[in-house]
Each structure stands twice: as structure tokens, then as C-alpha cells.
Image (cartoon, helix red, strand yellow):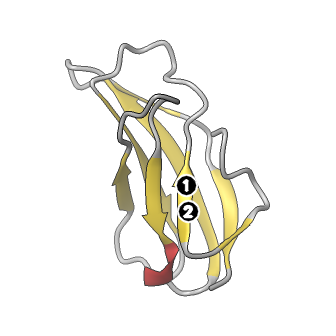
Amino acid sequence: MRTPTTGSVVRGTVTLVPDETGGLAPSGIGFTITGPGLAKHVHVVAVPTWYGPIGYWNSTHVPNGIYRIRAYAQNAAGVRDSSSSVSVRVSN
């Protein structure tokens, strides 16, 4: 992931930017977020922009703590490739 980076302290709306698409010609790009207080993974879908795909996560909906964010790309055949995760601290 390009942003945020491991060790970042985040609050409010967090901008999520993937690093690359793993060689796939993606039909969809998104992010999976895990951490304390989440019964299931949170999925954020990236939207296309002039600068590439960007996702937005409203971190005010989760308790403070350490969360792992992983970007993924999926092609039309359903093949998915994921990035390594980054750990961030939510401090709202």
C-alpha cells in the first residue's frame, strides 16, 4: 500500500491508496480492514480517479486500536491478488 504506511496514526476519514495491482487487469480494487471491535472484515471499494484508485475509510465507526489494512485487486474472472497488510493505529 502506498498510503497509509505501517505505523501511521490515523483518525477520521482515512485515504487508502494501493501500491499496485499485482499484474492483474483488475475489474475491481478494494481494501479489507480487520481489527478490534470488528465482528467481520470491513470492505472498502476503491473509486477510480485521475490519480488511480482511491478508497476512503471512516475510522470514527471503530474503537481506537491497531487495525490491519490490505489492498486487493480482482479481475473479471474472479481471480484476486492481495498486497501485504499494513498496521495502523486508530486514534479518534
Q: Amino acid at mark 2?
A: Val
The residue shown at (76%, 62%) is 8
The residue shown at (34%, 21%) is 26
Q: Is residue 17 visible?
A: yes
Q: Viewed as shown, does residue 14 lie left or right of 86?
A: left
Q: Position of residue 21 (x, y in %)?
A: 49, 23
Q: Amino acid at mark 1?
A: Thr
Q: Is residue 37 visible?
A: no
| Tag 1–tag 2 contact (CB < 8 Å) | yes
Determine whether the residue tagged by mark 2 lies in a helix, strand or loop. Answer: strand
Q: Position of residue 44 (x, y in %)?
A: 37, 54
Residue toward you, 78 or 2 = 2
Q: Position of residue 41 (x, y in %)?
A: 38, 63
Q: Viewed as shown, does residue 85 lie left or right of 44?
A: right
User: Where is the N terminus found, in terms of image quarters?
Assistant: top right
Residue of label 1: 15
Return the residue found at the far right.
Answer: 7
Determine whether the residue tagged by mark 1 lies in a helix, strand or loop. Answer: strand
Quadrant of the rendered image containing residue 58: bottom left
The residue shown at (56%, 25%) is 20
How crowded pointer 2 is (Cα within 10 Å; few <14, some 14-19, many 20+) is rated as: some
Residue of label 2: 14
User: Where is the C terminus found, in terms of image quarters?
Assistant: bottom right
Q: CA distance from mark 1 to mark 2?
A: 4 Å
Quadrant of the rendered image containing residue 78: top left
Q: Viewed as shown, does residue 78 lie left or right of 92?
A: left
When the figure is inspected, residue 85 is found, relative to residue 27, above or below; the finding is below
Q: Viewed as shown, does residue 6 lie left or right of 51?
A: right
The residue shown at (62%, 75%) is 11
Q: Position of residue 55 (x, y in %)?
A: 44, 49
The numbered mark at residue 50 is none
